[in-house]
Every structure is written in C-alpha cells, then in structure tokens.
Amino acid sequence: MACAAIHLAIVKRYLENHRDWNYEKVIAGTLYPDTVKKDESHYTDRNRGSDNVSHLRGKVNLYSFLKEHGV
C-alpha cells in the first residue's frame, strides 16, 4: 500500500494549511481511490491493447471522465 502512504503524507501536509476542513472526510476521500478497482478510479479502458502505445492510450479515458462529470 505504498500509494496509500504517499496519499496520506500529502494530505496530512495539506490539512496543516487548511485546518477548517473536515479531517475525517478528507482522509476518507484520499484513501477511497486505493480501495476500489483501478479501472473505476482512474478512468482506464478495460480492453487496453497489449502493445505499449495502445496500452498508454487506454490509460486515461478522458471522454469517460468528462461525460461522468457533465463537462
């Protein structure tokens, strides 16, 4: 869980400068991406190709992100 440790270290520093924020909610929101499938939290295409170029193209599905957020 190295990712979670890095996320917590960053948010801890951030919360030092934003003391009025709800600590529990910020921590929960910070850890949430580490608890779900990466395809769901990182907007990746499920059927990425096996070669490097198509794999990288499928890494971030900008269309899915924008559509979900109504942009």
Image (spheres, helix red, strand yellow):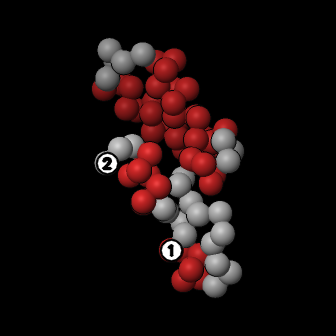
SS under mark 1 = helix
Left or right: residue 41 compared with residue 47: left
Instruction: Where is residue 60? Give x, y as percent.
Output: 49, 62
Under mark 1, the amino acid is: Arg
- SS class of the residue under badge 2? loop
In the shown orientation, is residue 2 left or right of residue 60? Answer: right
Is residue 5 visible in the rendered image? The answer is: no
In the rendered view, does 42 fall on the left or right side of 65?
right
Which quadrant would the N terminus be assigned to in this image?
Answer: top right
For residue 34, which quarter of the picture? top right
Where is residue 32? Give x, y as percent.
Answer: 59, 35
What is the tally of numbered marks visible in this picture? 2
- Apparent side of residue 24 relative to residue 17 in the rendered image (left or right): right
Residue for badge 2: 71
Q: Residue 33 location in percent, x, y?
A: 58, 41
- Label 1 environment density (alpha carbons within 10 Å; few <14, some 14–19, many ≥20): few
Residue at x 30% of width, y 26% of height: 17
Residue 14 sits above or below residue 7 on the image:
above
5 in relation to 21, above or below:
below
**Gap in angstroms between the C-alphas marked 2 and 1:** 21 Å
Residue 68 against residue 30 in the figure, above or below: below
Query: Where is mark 1, residue-wise?
Result: 57
Dot 2, how many residues are within 10 Å of its Cα: few (below 14), some (14-19), or many (20+)? few
Three-letter code, disc 2 = Val
**Label 2 with label 1: CB-CB less than 8 Å:** no
Q: Would residue 1 be visible to someone looking at this image?
A: yes
